Image: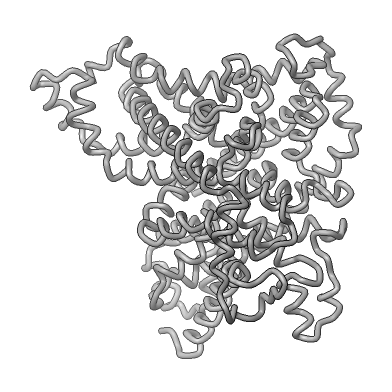
Amino acid sequence: MTTTLQKASIYTILAIALILVLVPMGVMITVSLQTSSSVNPLALPRDPQWGNYVEALRTGNLLPYFSNSILVLVITTTVAIAIAVLAAYGLHHGRRYKSDALSTFFLMGMILPAFSGTIPAFLVLREIHLLNTHIGLSLIQIASGLALPIFLYVNFFKTVPREIEEAAVVDGCGPWRTFLRIIFPLTLPITATTVIVVAINSWNDFFNPLIYLSSPEMRTLPVGLMAFKSQYNTNWPQMFAGATLVALPIIILYMFVQRFIIKGMVGGAVKG
Amino acid sequence: MKFMNLRNYILFVAPALLIYLVFFAGPIFSGLYYGFTDWNGFSFKAEWVGLENFQEAFRDPLLLTALKNMVILSVVVIVLQHSFSILLAVLLDQKVKGIVWMRAVIFFPVILNTVVIGYVWSYMYAPMVGFLPRLFAALGLDGLAQLDPLGDPKLAIYAIAFVMVWQYTGYSMMIYLAGLQSVSGEIYEAASIDGAGPFNKFFKVTLPLLIPSIIVNTVLSVIGCMKMFEHVFIMTQGGPANSTQTFGIMIYQYAFKTSQMGYGTAMAMILSVMILLATFIQIRLLSRLEVTN
């Protein structure tokens, strides 16, 4: 039985934890609404300066960066999901072709850091003239993030009853029809999780765009935001308005589908 | 399934394998070769120099700093993040009102953009104008208010480690929660009947049963610390006075600032070998546990 004292101490600890997490976020939003001459993180803004957000969008050139980020996210997510689900289905049914070894080979991608191969990958992109392009960046993101979706799909296929596929084969379906008509619709719940995780990783990616995109007009949002700092490094309200705008889509998405996000982000670690 | 003949198998796997080979695995394997050359990155041509890069690397003072920082980050993260996250996981495993959203809030920083986090914490730490100095000054703690955590070579790496703990406690907590949920309630009931109090229950029942989660979780954290790049790049760029150098920063600087691509690749290989070693140790520890259970 939990006593009142125990309950009180539980809530106290949890309250401290929540405050520690939320204070930096609160500071960011508070300062983003103050004037640069009177920044005070300890006081709420008396006269909210929404103009900081307009200024941040304009001087930080954030709108073009925003559309670059969206473009990269769409290419990366679509291609990564498509090739991962196909590969996982092949790996699942290809045991007699030593698919286990191939699975392990793919899973290496979860362990090794992207920058082990960055320098040669840079040269590869340069040779095929995809350096400083969004497609080139997407290809790198897809390749270095492929392990997680493959892993999630392979685990899912293990739970699909054989009878479903056997029935399809009896009805005269080949592997492609079986996959498209019967199996892919079944994956939709896990596909939702996978899409969200791949999309968030692409949206938050800082390292790859930093390396593979050189011209300012190609930048994605995180790198664009980083450039903002060096340009206006004393104007905290404007920087934080920019930072809040970058964080906003993720915050909104998180409010609606946090369950999927947490499951997808932690799933690889828990089962692995 | 009968229909998965070799031709279909290849067709299913080929697109993923091709992209993975060309843009991820291939570059890593070719790094094995380039690490032994004087490659400058302007062409695929490179002169074989044997072990020279590796000999130089182990004499490089930056590598020593990077190793030291790797140890500091790992120790701080393991001690702080894991004690916090185990505590929070145990508390949030009970029937407390509002646990779902409390878990969600604590997890939130994990998915926040590193640049945003870097900005916010640069400001939290900023001397004179920042949040922490002002807070300490307002509380009359002048000694603490004078500190410049990111600008002081002795403190900077700890300041960064604290940001990592802030960001990833929620991640470890979720893994521990998953571990706790596999522990059956009957064990706790049995412990209660035997007269165990909450502390005894935690140290004699919960903690031993969490050992597999602790192994997975700490190895993940250590690998995260080994791969450390973004937080440092955004907050200190490896400074002040190279005090926050990490392997990631070093590889980036050698490759893209001084064009020592061969040397940078050798560094990347040293790091990859250490990460594979850590993963191997994790697998061994876990399988040994399964044997003894």
Q: Is residue B29 above or below residue B116?
A: above
Q: Residue at x 75, y 16 (%)?
A: B42
Task: Where is residue B160? Give x, y as percent.
Answer: 73, 57
What residue do we see at 81% from left, 76% from top? B145
Residue at the left extreme of this rendering: A171
Depth check, front residue: B124 or B202: B124
Left/right of residue A89 with respect to residue B208 in the rendered view: left
Residue A29 lies in what quarter of the image?
bottom right
Q: Is residue B182 visible?
A: no
Give the percent coordinates (x, y) of residue A65: 54, 43
Picture coordinates of residue B181, whole percent (x, y): 40, 61
Nearer the observer, B122 or A118? B122
Rendered view: B283 above or below B195: above
Q: Which quarter of the rendering shows the N terminus of chain A?
A: bottom left
Residue A84 visible in this rendered orientation of the protein: yes
Q: Position of residue B180 (x, y in %)?
A: 45, 61
Query: In this image, A133 relative to B68: left or right?
Result: left
